[in-house]
């Protein structure tokens, strides 16, 4: 599996580029995907939930990272692009893994992570609680650590285009799940990347 991980980034980047609905995007580019991958690898490396095979975890994580925005039509606020991206990924991934003779990733976790990554803040239940979080906590057939790692990695790249962050000068860590991401989010190492 380690050898497979060495070639997976390039193949998934090419797949994402080929499948992106908005090939003219300014904010949701291959550079965004690479940064999200870097953050996902940092979170995974600094988190202690590997009761599973590390290579398998990273393998699944990379599908989430590279395919999460393929259905995005615009760089503007588009809270339901995750649903479109998830449906596209469900069609694309089986073909991709068969063509490359790769193992099938954990489709339930990947589909869930992509589908809900873009509407996390918009969904509230009747009590004002995050219904996506409630759904997430009640879903048993997904790898929650995988989804949390991806969600946090994507959130960590929000300073690239987030005017609210630029106004405050820091990220809101209330939407982060992992301890590492919460600590890293407002560190000089992280925010320094976006201060140009």
Image (cartoon, rainbow, N blue to C red):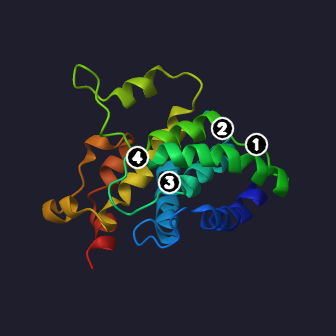
Q: In the structure shown, which secondary structural element does the residue marked by tag 3 occupy?
A: helix
Q: In the structure shown, which secondary structural element does the residue marked by tag 2 occupy?
A: helix
Residue 83 in the image, given as x and y percentages of width and height: 50, 42
In the image, residue 110 above or below residue 172: above
Residue drawn at x 33%, y 67% is 160
Query: Splitting the image into 4 quarters, where does residue 77 fall?
Result: bottom left
Query: Of 170 and 133, which appears nearest the observer?
Result: 133
> Which residue, given by chain and number where applicable, does mark 2 sit on?
107
Which is closer to the viewer, label 2 or label 3? 2
Tell whether 101 sits left or right of 189.
Answer: right
> Which residue, given by chain and number where applicable, does mark 4 sit on?
118
Q: In the structure shown, which secondary structural element does the residue marked by tag 1 occupy?
A: loop
Distance from Cα at disc 2 to Cα at disc 3? 18 Å
Q: Is residue 142 visible?
A: yes
Residue that sits furthest to the bottom in the current view: 196
Residue drawn at x 24%, y 55% is 171
Residue that sits furthest to the left in the current view: 167
> Which residue, given by chain and number where applicable, does mark 3 sit on?
40
Tell whether 137 sits left or right of 109.
Answer: left
Tell whether 124 sits left or right of 1.
Answer: left
- The reply to whether dot 2 and dot 1 touch (C-beta < 8 Å) is yes
Q: In the structure shown, which secondary structural element does the residue marked by tag 4 occupy?
A: loop
Q: Is residue 48 visible?
A: no
């Amino acid at each position: 599996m380690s050898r497979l991980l060495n070639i997976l980034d390039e193949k998934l980047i090419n797949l994402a580029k080929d499948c992106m609905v908005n090939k003219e995007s300014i904010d949701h580019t291959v550079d965004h995907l690479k940064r999200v991958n870097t953050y996902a690898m940092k979170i995974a490396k600094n988190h202690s939930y590997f009761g599973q095979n590390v290579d398998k975890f990273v393998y699944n994580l990379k599908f989430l990272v590279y395919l999460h925005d393929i259905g995005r039509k615009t760089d503007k606020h588009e809270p339901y692009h995750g649903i479109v991206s998830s449906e596209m990924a469900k069609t694309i991934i089986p073909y991709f893994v068969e063509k490359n003779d790769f193992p099938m990733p954990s489709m339930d976790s990947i589909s869930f992570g992509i589908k809900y990554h873009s509407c996390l803040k918009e969904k509230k239940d009747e009590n004002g609680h995050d219904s996506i979080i409630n759904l997430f906590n009640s879903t048993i057939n997904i790898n929650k650590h995988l989804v949390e790692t991806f969600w946090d990695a994507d959130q960590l790249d929000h300073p690239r285009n987030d005017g609210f962050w630029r106004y405050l000068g820091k990220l809101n860590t209330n939407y982060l799940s992992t301890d590492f991401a919460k600590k890293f989010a407002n560190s000089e190492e992280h925010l320094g990347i976006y201060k140009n």
